[in-house]
Image: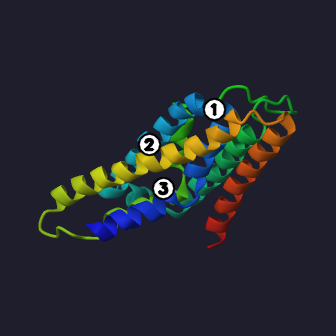
Amino acid sequence: MWSFAAAVFFLIITPGPGVLSVAGVGSGFGFRAGLAYMAGLWAGNNLVAFAVVTGLAAFVLSVPYVREVLLGASLCYLVYLAARIALAGSKVAFIESRTAPGLGNGIALQAINPKAYAVNTTLFGGFVFMPDHLMAETLIKFALLNAIWIPAHFAWLYAGASLKRLDLPQRTQRIINILMALAMLLVVALALLS
């Protein structure tokens, strides 16, 4: 069980679209606005975990063209989300991003986030510690996952919001938002290449 908890910690804390986007929303829109988005990420992650545990994810992703469509949708949505973070508070071109991504955006991101499926498949498919009590093990895994997931994402949101609270010059804040958006896209690109 301790190896499971350690795996959860390291898989959750490492940068991926979820943690980077919650930090970006915190940086671009502030802590309060980031809470709704984080709640959506949490709900979406639990839905993905449930889909993995029940086998629904494996069934759906076993169809090759569905996997490709979801990957394409994931890329498009992550680029859109990165643009919203990068352009937070600006009036640049095609996106005027004055409102923060919210609950629905968080759920949508997790539903198409490749890292969410990979992490949950690894966590729920491996690290067997109660082989004769699958239901109890699954419930404990959900509890441990959420006990680590929630504070880790609060920390990322707080880190992003702390940058916003520094009341940096608009140009500096904009550069930070753009760097966060680029970091999110870089992580996605690395995941695609591997």
Residue at the (38%, 53%) spot, across then down: 148
Quadrant of residue 150 within the rendered picture: top left
Looking at the image, tell me whether mark 1 or mark 2 is earlier in sequence order: 1
Q: Closer to the camera, 71 or 41?
A: 41
Residue at the (66%, 67%) spot, across then down: 190
Which mark lies nearer to you, 1 or 2? 1
Q: Is residue 91 above or below residue 12?
A: above
Q: Secondary structure at mark 2?
A: helix
Q: Closer to the camera, 188 or 100?
A: 100
Work out how far the residue at label 3 is from the one at label 1, CA to CA, in angstroms.
Answer: 24 Å
Residue type highlighted by circle 3:
Ala
Q: Position of residue 116 (x, y in %)?
A: 48, 56
Q: Viewed as shown, does residue 15 lie left or right of 118?
A: right
Looking at the image, tell me whether mark 2 or mark 3 is earlier in sequence order: 2
Q: Closer to the camera, 9 or 47?
A: 9
Q: Which mark is residue 116?
A: 3
Q: Is residue 89 above or below residue 138?
A: above
The quarter of the image holding the C terminus is bottom right
Residue type highlighted by circle 1:
Gly
Work out how far the residue at label 1 is from the one at label 2, CA to CA, in angstroms.
Answer: 18 Å
Residue at the (83%, 35%) spot, across then down: 169
Work out how far the residue at label 2 is from the one at label 3, CA to CA, in angstroms.
Answer: 11 Å
Q: Residue beneath label 1, please? A: 30
Label 2 neighbour load within 10 Å: few <14, some 14-19, many 20+:
many
Quadrant of residue 134 within the rendered picture: bottom left
Looking at the image, tell me whether mark 3 or mark 1 is earlier in sequence order: 1
Q: Is residue 125 above or below residue 116?
A: below
Residue type highlighted by circle 2:
Trp
Q: Position of residue 115 (x, y in %)?
A: 52, 59
Q: Residue beneath label 2, please? A: 42
Which mark lies nearer to you, 2 or 3? 2
The quarter of the image holding the N terminus is bottom left
